[in-house]
Image (cartoon, rainbow, N blue to C red):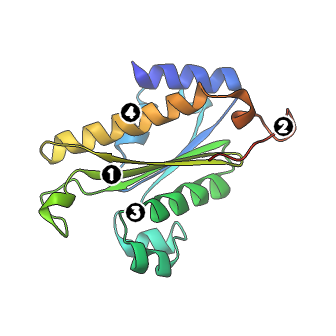
């Protein structure tokens, strides 16, 4: 199970993670915290579904929301950076997207942006999922957890604590 592997890797690295969710509505936090021992690595999470909550709670600038929209790499990056800063966790994951059936355009349904930040490393990914609302949300959760796993398995320099080694900026 992916969440179990992530918890094991986080424990091994002595990392804590925080999440900021929109499209998944708490599904990522639930998936992680369903695993025994998650309390050792899961710091906290936010579910911010509206633009107002993204701005007021997560500090996503109104200008970002107006210029790029709630479903954008700029918004998801801002969500992840806030979650990391506010929580004090070593790593933060954020996700936003359109699960449907409503979206600005029908072709937007299934569009998802995921961001992860660890120390000075920030990565965003855009995904496109197909299916009904429930299927898109499940795929988005899995896609986000897959990005966490991929990041945890990446170069040690990316994930080194500032006091434990050199930190490198992500691309």
Q: Position of residue 46 (x, y in %)?
A: 47, 55
Query: How many dots with numbers?
Result: 4
Q: Earlier in the sequence, mark 3 or mark 2?
A: 3
Identify the residue at image location x=59%, y=29%: 152
Q: Earlier in the sequence, mark 1 or mark 3?
A: 3
Q: Residues within 10 Å of mark 4 (few under 14, many from 20)?
A: some
Identify the residue at image location x=52%, y=76%: 61
Q: Position of residue 32 (x, y in %)?
A: 45, 32
Residue for badge 2: 166
Q: Residues within 10 Å of mark 1 (few under 14, many from 20)?
A: many
Q: Looking at the image, is mark 4 or mark 3 nearer the viewer?
A: 3
Q: Is residue 46 toward the left or the right of residue 99 in the image? A: right
Q: Position of residue 49 (x, y in %)?
A: 34, 63
Residue for badge 3: 72
User: Is mark 4 in CB contact (under 8 Å) with mark 2?
Assistant: no
Say which quarter of the image contains residue 27.
top left
Instruction: Work out how far the residue at label 4 is from the one at label 3, CA to CA, in angstroms.
Output: 24 Å
Instruction: Work out how far the residue at label 3 is from the one at label 2, CA to CA, in angstroms.
Output: 30 Å
Instruction: Work out how far the residue at label 2 is from the one at label 1, CA to CA, in angstroms.
Output: 32 Å
């Amino acid at each position: 199970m992916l969440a179990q592997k992530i918890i094991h890797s986080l424990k091994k690295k002595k990392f804590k993670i925080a999440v900021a969710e929109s499209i998944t509505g708490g599904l990522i936090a639930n998936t992680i915290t369903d695993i025994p021992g998650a309390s050792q690595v899961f710091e906290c999470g936010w579910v911010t579904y509206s633009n107002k909550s993204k701005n007021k709670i997560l500090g996503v600038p109104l200008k970002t929301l107006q210029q790029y929209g709630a479903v954008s790499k700029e918004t998801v990056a801002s969500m992840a950076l806030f979650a990391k800063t506010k929580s004090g966790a070593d790593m933060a994951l954020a996700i936003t997207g359109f699960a449907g059936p409503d979206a600005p355009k029908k072709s937007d349904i299934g569009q998802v942006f995921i961001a992860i930040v660890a120390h000075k490393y920030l990565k965003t990914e855009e995904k496109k999922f197909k299916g009904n609302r429930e299927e898109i949300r499940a795929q988005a959760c899995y896609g986000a957890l897959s990005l966490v796993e991929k990041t945890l398995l990446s170069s040690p320099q990316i994930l080194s604590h500032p006091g434990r080694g050199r930190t490198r900026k992500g691309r």
